[in-house]
Image: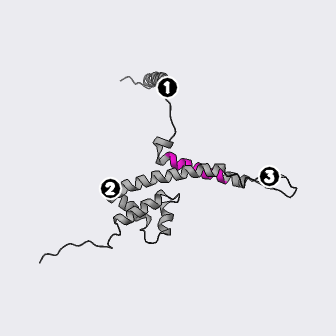
Amino acid sequence: MAKTSSKIGRPTKYNSALVEEICNVIASSSKGTKVLCKENMHWPCQDTLFTWLKKYPEFSEQYAQAKICQIELLVDEILEIADDESNDCFIDEDGKPVSNNSVINRARLKIDTRKWLACKLVPKVYGNKIDIDSDQNISMSEELLKLSAELDSKYAREY
């Protein structure tokens, strides 16, 4: 008798309702997937999410859209952090206002981290714009050709 092959391992939790929930929560939260997976006990672990991204194209598309929405949240947070000056100063023992450098530096770190994420995950919208002057590009090409010719003549061997 021939044996029928069966899949080994646990059955997958993958279903459209769970995928929709995961993507909705990611889109409306500034937390990372690792933290969200820990907070939502019925979700699979982060490694499983990454496996699903490779295995299920429809999940991959929804996830990408959710991450774009998440970046919009992070951009809003950048504005909130920058506008919040509530703890930037404090009054010392002499009654003088003093800058709270640790709070300011922490806010700067939060802003820079969110800007970096936005730049990397949605580069078309938040990436650095590079303006290349065509005249400069031509002169650089000519300079490279000259340098290449100089190196060729310097290291040329006669056989």
Disc 3 on helix, strand or loop?
A: strand
Magenta stretch, main secondary structure class: helix
- List the residue tagged with mark 1: 133
Disc 2 on helix, strand or loop?
A: helix
Q: Is residue 105 left or right of residue 158?
A: right
Residue with the most extreme left position: 1
Q: Position of residue 42 (x, y in %)?
A: 43, 71
Q: Position of residue 39 (x, y in %)?
A: 50, 69
Q: Is residue 79 left or right of residue 152?
A: right
Residue found 50% across the figure and 34% down from its top: 130
Residue 78 lies in the magenta stretch:
no
Calculate the distance from the C-alpha at mark 1 to the C-alpha at mark 3. Answer: 46 Å
Query: So how many labels did they put on this image?
Result: 3
- List the residue tagged with mark 2: 57
Residue neighbourhood size for the residue with mark 1, other residues' Cα within 10 Å, grouped as few (<14), some (14–19), many (≥20): few
The circle on residue 98 is 3
Q: Is residue 35 left or right of residue 12?
A: right
The amino acid type, in three-letter code, at marker 1 is Asp
Q: Position of residue 31 (x, y in %)?
A: 52, 60
Calculate the distance from the C-alpha at mark 3 to the C-alpha at mark 2. Answer: 54 Å
Q: Which residues are magenta?
A: 106-119
Image quadrant for the C terminus?
top left
Calculate the distance from the C-alpha at mark 2 to the C-alpha at mark 1. Answer: 40 Å
Residue found 35% across the figure and 69% down from its top: 13
Q: Is residue 17 above or below residue 109?
A: below
Q: Position of residue 135 (x, y in %)?
A: 48, 21
